[in-house]
Image (spheres, rainbow, N blue to C red):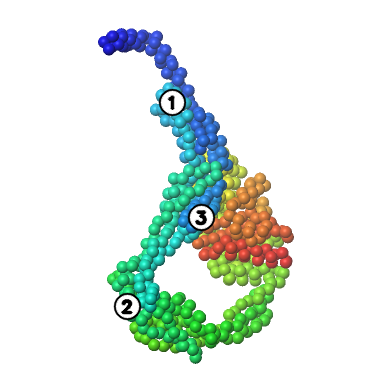
Amino acid sequence: MDMVSRQLKVAGAWLVKQLRSPKVVAVCVGIYVLAVVPQLLYPSSRALPFATLDGDRVAQTDSEYLSKHLLSEYGDKALVVTYPGGETKSTLAKAGINTDTKRAQQDLTAYPTWKQLIPLSLLVTGISTNVQVHGSVDSQRFAEFAKVVAEKCYQAPKNAGVKVADNSVVLDPAKPGRACKPDALLRQIEAEPITKAGMRFVAKTQAEQPTRTDKDVEGVIGSAQAIVAKPMSIVVGERTYEVSPKNLASWLAFTEDASSKKLSIGVNKAEVEKFLATAQKDIYIAPGTTVISTLDGAETGRIVGANGRGINMANTVAAVEKQITDSREGAITATLSVLVPKVTYSRSYSPTTAGLQALLLDVSKDNGDFAVSVRLPSGALLHANGTKTYHPASTYKMFVGWAVLKRIEAGQMQWADQTVNGQTVAQCFDAMIVRSDNPCGEWFGEKIGWATVNSMLKGIGFTCTNLSSAWYSCANDQTLFLQKLQAGQLLNAASTTRLLDVMKRQIYRAGIPQGTKLAVADKVGFINGFLHDSGIVYGPSGTYELSIMSKGSSWGAIAAAAAKIQAQLNRM
């Protein structure tokens, strides 16, 4: 070991001597500079050498290529969420999950200055870089998707109750339920990578505890036993129906006092009505139907249906409830009532604009909070509740799309300009209309200025739309915009074609397109119960504009309304 130590000492002294030589130092510095300078000059917008994206080589590609690649390969892919007993299928775009291009670009180009000063670090860092693609969540669209998952996944907890076993009342134990909470689903989606096949995962569920536990019921079991033990019968006409202990137990309901938390025994009215509906079979006479015939909304005839007879459910259930809560026994006489005929309408419409106007009024009346506006190929406006204002939801994005194209035409905005989430104006414009992307819509609105957009809309004749000091629109304004767009009065030919093209490609097609079965350039909107669809319909007898705005409705109702309108137009 002494010999080895001496040799190491001599070698160390020689090395120190060499490093003190100016020539050696110069050579070392030169080598360092040659190794580091290319790293310092490496473009920050390019993916690192040998870097991969989900296993695919994307080394040295620029941000524009990466953005296009991410959107094309990882954009509107399948989304499948499974849970006990089922699954929900959709697409990433419809669920509000956008490819987070900005994050992926940052990860692929991440090369801090301190690393750039380390020789060969560019290659080492690039080789070790494999980026997974993640999504950025559009909260509004995601909320609608999460609501569907939550409804399908949900299994209600079973509250503790009583049941009859061997002619005595015993505890019917509580059982926990199951829920897929939107916030938990959001956390999973944010953590889950997107692959070229899309995204598939098992939703985490949470136990839903019953509001009434076994312990809560135990205290009233004795009282329930006493109620069930007392005989009860119901007299319906000339017949008496004995209520079995099992039936009587099913009629019991337990309510909790908000302050004391104590349970009291009441009546499950729905269960009593089920029993009465069966018991009235001998005396029941079904009411007839009064049919009112109309033409263009005016009554042309009436066939009056006959009265019927049956149990007055409200009065009889109240008598049952009183007997149970008063702990009485004996017979209850059901109250009988005249049942008035149901009223239906046999509607017909002349093949005229008057007929179409009457149809619009009926469609609006039949669907609750519903507004319909139609602008015919002739330019005529027909509507029902057309000036009623609603939150526009995402229909505002077609107005913003128009404002963007006006900026493009004026040279005030370029398609290659950067916007939000690493997207260009061109990519964000398409996303805003095709996928109803909210971050892009909001970015454009703020960039242009909501007051400016509002002023533009008023300038083309809008009377019931405000996107500045308030936030509302109406069906008549929406069809006016679409009519002017289709006529080429808002934009030059190229810009008009571009906006119509993305509207024809928007992914939510269950409303007007589904109902008319025709080519439609439309924009939908949905938020907090508001559901709208406004579009240009390319009909066989001419192009027309149709806007349906609603609250508390459904895609099926909108599609059905559009189908009726198209059928009427086919007759005109």
Looking at the rendered image, the disc whose residue lies closer to the viewer, 3 or 2, is 2
Residue for point 46% across, 45% down = 192
- Given residues 11 and 85, the one toward you in this image is 85
Looking at the rendered image, the disc whose residue lies closer to the viewer, 1 or 2, is 2
Looking at the image, can residue 169 be seen? yes
The residue indicated by pointer 1 is: 121
Among the two numbered marks 1 and 2 on one chain, the one whose residue lies closer to the N terminus: 1
* Residue 511: image location, x then y, percent: 60, 59
Amino acid marked by disc 2: Ser
Amino acid marked by disc 3: Glu
The residue indicated by pointer 2 is: 223
Secondary element type, mark 3: strand
Looking at the image, can residue 438 be seen? no
State left or right for residue 181 relative to residue 278.
Answer: left
Amino acid marked by disc 1: Ser
Assess whether mark 3 and mark 1 are in contact (beta carbons under 8 angstroms). Answer: no
**Label 1 neighbourhood size at 10 Å, few (<14), some (14-19), many (20+)?**
some
Q: Is residue 234 above or below residue 364?
A: below
Among the two numbered marks 1 and 3 on one chain, the one whose residue lies closer to the N terminus: 3
Quarter that holds the C terminus: bottom right
Residue for point 31% across, 71% down = 218
Assess whether mark 2 and mark 1 are in contact (beta carbons under 8 angstroms). Answer: no
Q: Which mark is residue 87?
A: 3
Q: Is residue 570 above or below residue 200?
A: below
